[in-house]
Amino acid sequence: MIWKWRIGRWRITFTFAPMSDVTGVNGNLEDDNHILMWDFDNTTLNDVATELLKVQRVYELPTIHILETKDNKNFMAYCFKRTPWLKVVEILAFTKGVDWNYIKYGVYRGHFTLRVTPKDGREPKLIWSLVSDVPDDCSVADLMSWTKYETLSGKWWK
């Protein structure tokens, strides 16, 4: 729930919403490249896999790992390919079904972040890897920053 008041040139906003504290990984690497990370909400595994297979083929990407974050509804994916920032943005924008808020905030911050810890008792779980003959050129160990943040929760209680 959001309440807004405007007094002259000032706006006062009060928000009341359930939140969850989570930890996420940022996709930036030390050499100014990034790994590819996608976030999909309110979709199906079939739609996500179909779209990521197309992206994998067009951009000649290594294996893409798909994780489920909400039963049969929300998914994220990782691809361990060193990629320049503008190419990351291009690939994500090319990928149909990616959460636009994820793209917007990632572009604003200059890196993308995906949750790795549970939210509302739901832990991201690997459910499918889209195998490729193209080898990975980096790994989880190459990721240089992790962050704690808060996100909207689906629960009104703890």
Image: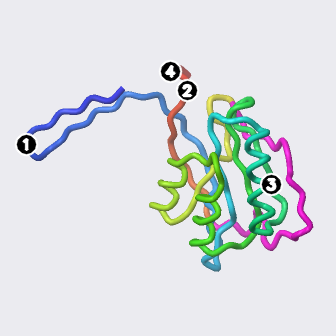
Please count the marks in the image: 4
Q: Are marks 4 and 2 in contact (CB under 8 Å)?
A: no
Q: Position of residue 50 (x, y in %)?
A: 78, 47
Q: Which residue is mark 2?
A: 154
Distance of mark 1 from mark 2, alpha carbons? 35 Å
* Label 1 vs label 2, nearer the camera: 1
Q: Badge 2: few (under 14), some or many (20 or more) residues near its Cα, within 10 Å? A: few
Q: Which residues are magenta?
A: 122-144
Q: Is residue 108 above or below residue 19?
A: below
Q: Which mark is residue 8?
A: 1
For badge 2, the amino acid type reads Gly
* Label 3 vs label 1, nearer the camera: 3
Q: Position of residue 123 (x, y in %)?
A: 72, 36
Q: Main secondary structure of the magenta part?
A: loop
Q: Earlier in the sequence, mark 3 or mark 1?
A: 1
Q: Position of residue 93 (x, y in %)?
A: 58, 58
* Label 3 vs label 2, nearer the camera: 3
Q: Which residue is mark 3?
A: 53
Q: Is residue 136 magenta?
A: yes
Distance of mark 3 from mark 2, alpha carbons? 31 Å
For badge 1, the amino acid type reads Gly
Q: Position of residue 102 (x, y in %)?
A: 54, 50
* Label 4 vs label 3, nearer the camera: 3
Q: Which residue is mark 4?
A: 156
